[in-house]
Amino acid sequence: MAIPDFARANFETLMKAAKAGDLALMECTEVASGETRYVLCAVGREAQDYVMTPFGHLAPGNPYEAYIPPA
C-alpha cells in the first residue's frame, strides 16, 4: 500500500521542524471525546505570534497493542 501524498508531505514538514528544533508536545483536549491528549506539534511564527501545527497525538497505553504493521 502506497503512502498518500498528504501523509508524505506532513511527514516531511515534521522532519524539517525536528531538524530545526521546532517541535513541541502540548496537552490538549480532544473535541470528540473530551479526553486529554498529548499532541506533537510543529512550532512556527506568524509575525509576533507562535503558530502550533498539530500532527498527531501520542498513543496512550501500549502502542504495540493499538496498531498492526503492514503485512
Image: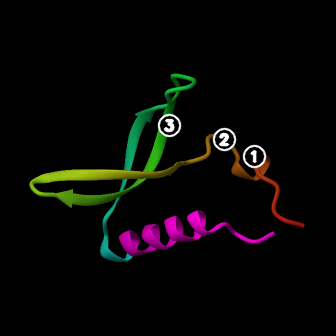
66 shown above or below 12: above
Q: Secondary structure at mark 3?
A: strand
Q: Position of residue 54 (x, y in %)?
A: 43, 50
Measured Cα–Cα span from mark 3 to mark 2:
12 Å
Give the prevailing secondary structure in the magenta stretch: helix
Asked whether 48 or 71 is in front, the reply is 48
What residue sits 20% from the left and 52% below the top? Answer: 50
Pointer 3 residue: 37
What colouring method underlies this structural image? Answer: rainbow
Q: Secondary structure at mark 1?
A: helix
Query: Is 3 covered by the magenta stretch?
Result: yes
Q: Are dots 1 and 3 in contact, CB under 8 Å?
A: no
Q: Position of residue 60 (x, y in %)?
A: 62, 40
Q: Residue 13 occupies which quadrant of the picture?
A: bottom left
Pointer 1 residue: 66
Asked whether 4 or 62 is in front, the reply is 4
Q: Are dots 3 and 2 in contact, CB under 8 Å?
A: no
